[in-house]
Image (cartoon, grey):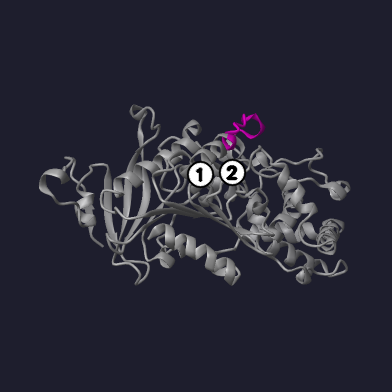
Amino acid sequence: MKKILIPVAILFIILSSCQTRISTPGALFKLSDSITVEEISTDSAHFEQSWLIYFTQPLDHSAPEKGTFNQRIWLSHKSIDAPMVCVTEGYSANRNYTSELASLTNSNQLIIEHRYFSESCPDSLDWQYLTVEQAAADHHRIIQFFKQLYTKKWATTGISKGGQTAIFHRALYPEDVDLSVPYVAPVNLMREDQRLFSFFDEVGTKEDRAKILSFQKAVFEKRDEMMPLFENYADEKGYTFRMGYDKAFEIVVLEYPFSFWQWGSKVEQIPATDASTNELFEHLRKGSDIGYVSDQSWNDIKPFFYQAYKELGYYAYVPGELSPYIKGFDKDTISSSMFAPGGDTLKFIPTMQTIMTKLEEANPAIVAIIGENDPWGATSINNENLSNTMRAVQPGGSHLTRIKTLPQPIQDEAIKKIKQTLN
């Protein structure tokens, strides 16, 4: 693989005087001393060339003198005459790939890793700069740079938190792109949005909800037999729990309904309450990720939990009928803030109210892909003032809902709006 170190001197191309414009990625790269580039293999035949890029960003866009960090980007080039799809990852972006939207629209593609994740971290994790506003400014700066070459229509897209990121950027910089396609993306209006509590009283059928609750009770009732299996499994995976095994076990059981609906599990696959301990445990570990509550997971995604309990909002657990089985917690509502750096000491800022106000004012073109039975669908964009937003909802859909999984009439309508906007 060929590495290119961009010269320190900035080379300017004055379009108006020479009556030409930048026509290749290589020429674009030479315009800035704030990037390093490595040519890599393309992910698919859809693209002509691809590069791994590190783009130097200010830690604080309002005060560049406070320092910088390098943000990781993948550029996949098809043609300067094609649209550009910008994938705003909400977490790490550890590989190049071809997004559904880029493939669908025959577009070029940028994948941008979110600040404070993986290789896009400053030397010191000063959490005050991990904000919606700073991240949106990252994306704005990158988009403006690449627009010097890619002058056709632009779209942002992302899945889950990546979809949130696309929405936030669009609200703050509505003119940067022509379309946003967030997948299964929530916009939580509170620290722990009430709609995420109500969802579990309404999703599926009464019988479905009863069977899920019965499974949880059966697991708790066999707790003494379960714990050795739980601990052995954790040891095999190398998981540790600073909260202790009892609390970790309880959170995993309480998490089960959220995971069940989020990932589209089948009620008929839930074991009977009189099933063996091994069968119950195997279903629990497959249906509710034990690693989610581990120290190892916390270390990887603690920036997310900081954001969740500072600006984005998240969900809590209400044991309800399971309260008699809970030993490690003494509250009626168990907050996930325990995973956030700073925990309950974090002061939540209602940024989403501002985001929604700005989004309403701009009323940009958005196609929101939503799964009906996905818990995050409960807090998805649903605002009558956003007349240019299409909600493409998959009936019974989960967090795995994509354009290609939508029923044909809805899929056709979504694709029509996307292609009309990007042509």
Q: Position of residue 230 (x, y in %)?
A: 73, 58
Q: Residue at x 48, y 64 (%)?
A: 416
Query: Is residue 404 left or right of 27 when viewed as pictured?
Result: right
Q: What amino acid type is highlighted by mark number 2?
A: Asn
Residue 3, quarter of the rendered image: bottom left
Task: Work out whether 101 lies above or below 340.
Answer: below
Q: Residue at x 55, y 48 (%)?
A: 387
Residue 349 colored magenta?
A: yes
Q: Residue at x 27, y 42 (%)?
A: 34
Task: Please state, as top left, top right, bottom left or bottom right, where the C terminus lies in the image.
Answer: bottom left
Task: Please state, as top left, top right, bottom left or bottom right, where the N terminus lies in the image.
Answer: bottom left
Q: Position of residue 382 (x, y in %)?
A: 63, 48
Q: Is residue 246 visible?
A: no
Label 1 vs 2, first from the N-terminus: 1
Q: Tag on residue 299?
A: none
Q: Is residue 143 visible?
A: yes
For this rendering, which residue is in front, 359 or 296? 359
Q: Mark 1 — residue?
A: 363
Q: Residues within 10 Å of mark 2 (few under 14, many from 20)?
A: few
Q: What amino acid type is highlighted by mark number 1?
A: Asn
Q: Position of residue 41 (x, y in %)?
A: 31, 66
Task: Work out whether 101 lies above or below 147.
Answer: below
Q: Residues within 10 Å of mark 1 (few under 14, many from 20)?
A: some
Boundaries of the magenta span = 342-353
Q: Mark 2 — residue?
A: 385
Q: Secondary structure at mark 1?
A: loop
Q: Secondary structure at mark 2?
A: loop
Q: Alpha-carbon distance for marks 1 and 2?
A: 8 Å
Asked if marks 1 and 2 touch (Cβ < 8 Å), the reply is yes
Residue 65 colored magenta?
A: no
Q: Position of residue 197 (x, y in %)?
A: 75, 46
